[in-house]
Amino acid sequence: MGSLSLPPNVRDRLSDTLSAHTNELISLFSRFVKQGKGMLQPHQLLHEYKAVIPEADRAKLKDGVFEDVLKAAQEAIILPPWVALAIRPRPGVWEYVRVNVSELAVEELTVAEYLQFKEELADSSHENFVLEVDFEPFNASFPRPSLSKSIGNGVQFLNRHLSSKLFNDKESMWPLLNFLRVHSYRGIVSLLAIIRLLFLNC
């Protein structure tokens, strides 16, 4: 999906759209809420949007931010009277909002608030005792892509990183060489097989 240029403050623009097109959007969000507690995927959101709002009214909404928000939404969490949206306007950028269908109120959520809201699908007890696992120590030496074009191309990014490390740090070659020396494929030592392929392709 291509990048969508959403405004910096989605909450304010979404509030403005709700005020300008109250009847249309209330019909849509009420349809979401009537389905009860649950989760909707992107294709379900767009299907409901086209099913509930007539084409003529959808043409009016194209001028606002709502259609862009809906196309960029990766999921919706329904906990009546709230509908929360996880919006990905472009690679690596996420925004979270929730709409109170009864009060027509729009709130911006942090990542932690959105995840806590999502957890209520499974546990609505509102207890503060939530299990949290910190995986950060495992990522301490792991390379992180800094360019947006690398997002979604993880294998290619890792291949380039490992290749660069192997050729720039000779000590990194020894584990690979030792691995190839002791392993074989169909009776042929892996290292010898690679050397043979290199000669054949010369």
Image (cartoon, rainbow, N blue to C red):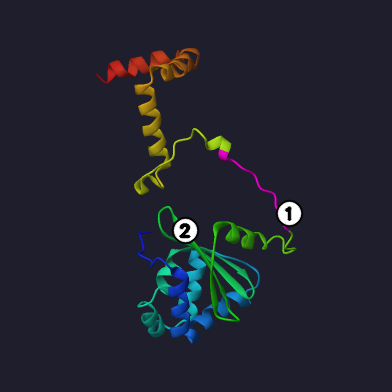
> Badge 1 is on which residue?
129
* Quarter of the image that includes the C terminus: top left
Q: Quadrant of residue 110?
A: bottom right
Q: Which residues are magenta?
A: 128-136
Q: What residue sits 44% from the left and 15% below the top?
A: 174
Q: Is residue 142 magenta?
A: no
Q: What residue sits 45% from the left and 76% below the top?
A: 50
Q: Position of residue 55 (x, y in %)?
A: 40, 82
On screen, residue 186 above or below 42: above
Q: Position of residue 113 (x, y in %)?
A: 60, 61
Q: Is residue 132 magenta?
A: yes
On screen, residue 139 above or below 50: above
Q: Position of residue 118 (x, y in %)?
A: 62, 61
Q: Position of residue 32 (x, y in %)?
A: 57, 75
Left or right side of 24 for 149: left
Q: What residue sits 61% from the left and 76% below the top?
A: 33
Q: Secondary structure at mark 2?
A: strand
Q: Quadrant of residue 98?
A: bottom right
Instruction: In this rendered view, identify the residue nearer to me: 41 or 102.
Output: 102
On screen, residue 23 above or below 15: below
Left or right side of 167 for 30: right
Disc 1 to disc 2, how far (Cα)?
26 Å
> Badge 2 is on which residue?
94
Q: Amino acid at mark 1?
A: Phe
Instruction: In this rendered view, identify the residue nearer to me: 9 or 165.
Output: 9
Of badges 1 and 2, nearer the viewer stands 1
Q: Secondary structure at mark 1?
A: loop
Q: Main secondary structure of the magenta part?
A: loop
* Quarter of the image that includes the N terminus: bottom left
Q: Amino acid at mark 2?
A: Trp
Q: What residue sits 41% from the left and 15% below the top?
A: 191
Instruction: In this rendered view, identify the residue nearer to me: 104 or 178.
Output: 104
